[in-house]
Amino acid sequence: MTAVLPTHGGPTRPTADPATTHPATTHPVTTTRSGVSDVPGAVPWATVLVAAVVLGAADLWWVLVLRGAVGFIQRARSPFTVWATEVVLWLPLVALGVLLGLTAAQRVAAHRRGASVAAVGGMVAGASAAGVALLAVQAVYDTALQRGQVSEMSSMVGKGCDAACVQRQLDSVAGLQLRAFGVGVALVVVTNVVLATWLWAAAGGRLRLTGPATTATAPDTVLRRGLAATLAGTAAIHLAVVPEHLEEWPAAGAFFLVLATVELLAAAAVLRRLRGDLLVVVAVSVVPLVVWLVSRTMGLPIGPEPGATEAVGPADVVSCLLELGSLLLVGLLVTAAPRPEAPHRATSGRVLVLAVAVTTVVGLSWTGIPWLDAIGVVGGGGH
């Protein structure tokens, strides 16, 4: 909108409305009838974490109940101890799902299409997606273990069970896991609906889906946060395997300890934008990648077993992926063209950080950390 101002003896000239002079920095704030604000910004961490803890803890309990009921018998452990431990591993994935669900709900609420339903639906959809994914992984894993046990037992009993008998047992195992998966999905969804509605009611029907209107995150900041997260994740995996390598070869343990320390320092340097930070990131990512590649293909020329190739473990792969991710983010930081700041990029940064956290947790679960023994995780070693 423009205002036409008269001049002394001259033509009129338009004057820009202050409200439209800087559209990129002006964000009108409105509130829906349910009290959910329509401010264009990122979903607050508090909303995400509270929903993730409440819904994720409940969903994980159902997963463990089904594991004890129909899972591989060797995986059955003390339910409460396992639940309390696995919540730590489970939380980043649920938080990522909840963040994505609430971000979608935020967009729906901005168009005034049932903000309350959108808020509850976003939490339910995000947490349920994570729960269903975990149920599916558990069903596939337990099915493989149980089918292997059936095949092994049939070979030991001789002619007591012919091929048709073995096949019926295998089909029975698959059918049982499929039915358990269906029951688990129903339990997870219903539980999430009840708990999400309870959270919305406990908040007085005023769930906060958006942050302040002034929150704006530059793409450079988003990439730096993601880069710091990948460095911290790689450092966590390297620290987890230090004791194992100290026992095998003290020099290797010292190498991983120094490497993890430098990675943490590099993460801090990236966030503080210190001079030469990206060069340090490249070095601290390339060096372990090269060492790992040589150790898995030709074997290291030094050490307890010179020239012997090492086996590839799941933790190795995750660590390498994080290091490659660091190099990719460095490339994006160097080549990305400057762009105007936008509030919604804060959400992109949070999704990136949570995705890295999920990847890191997966890698840590395979490093053989002692406290992971409670949930039956088999260590796969580090670099």
Image: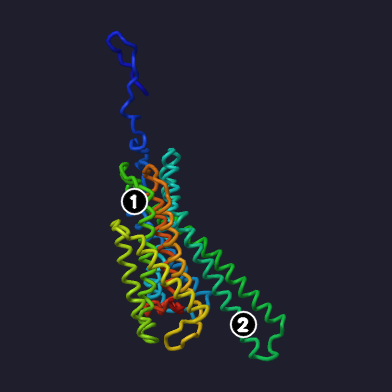
Disc ID at residue 242:
none
Residue at horizontal 34%, vertical 37%? Answer: 27
Within 10 Å of disc 2 (Cα), the crowding (few <14, some 14-19, many 20+) is some
Give the residue at x 30% y 42%. 214
* Front residue of this view, candidates 321 and 213: 321
Number of the front mark, 2 or 1? 1
Outermost top residue: 9
The reply to whether residue 29 is in sight is: no
From the viewer's side, name the closer residue of 168 and 53. 53
- Mark pair 2, 1: CA separation: 49 Å
Judge whether 62 appears above or below 26 on screen.
Answer: below
The quarter of the picture where residue 157 lies is bottom right
Residue 12, horizontal then vertical, whole percent: 34, 14
Q: Which mark is residue 44?
A: 1
Which of the 4 image quadrants contains residue 289?
bottom left
Q: What's the amino acid at mark 1?
A: Pro
Mark 1: which secondary structure? loop
Image quadrant in which you'd find residue 334: bottom left
Which x, y percent locates residue 376? 45, 78
Residue type at mark 2?
Val
Residue 261: % across, % down: 31, 71
174 to 36, vertically: above or below:
below
256 or 100, which is in the foreground? 256
**Residue 194 location (% of width, % of height):** 42, 56
Q: Is residue 147 visible?
A: yes
Pointer 2 residue: 150
Of mark 2 and mark 1, the one earlier in the sequence is: 1
**Quadrant of the image containing the C terminus:** bottom left
Q: Residues within 10 Å of mark 1 (few under 14, many from 20)?
A: some
Q: Residue at x 37, y 55 (%)?
A: 48
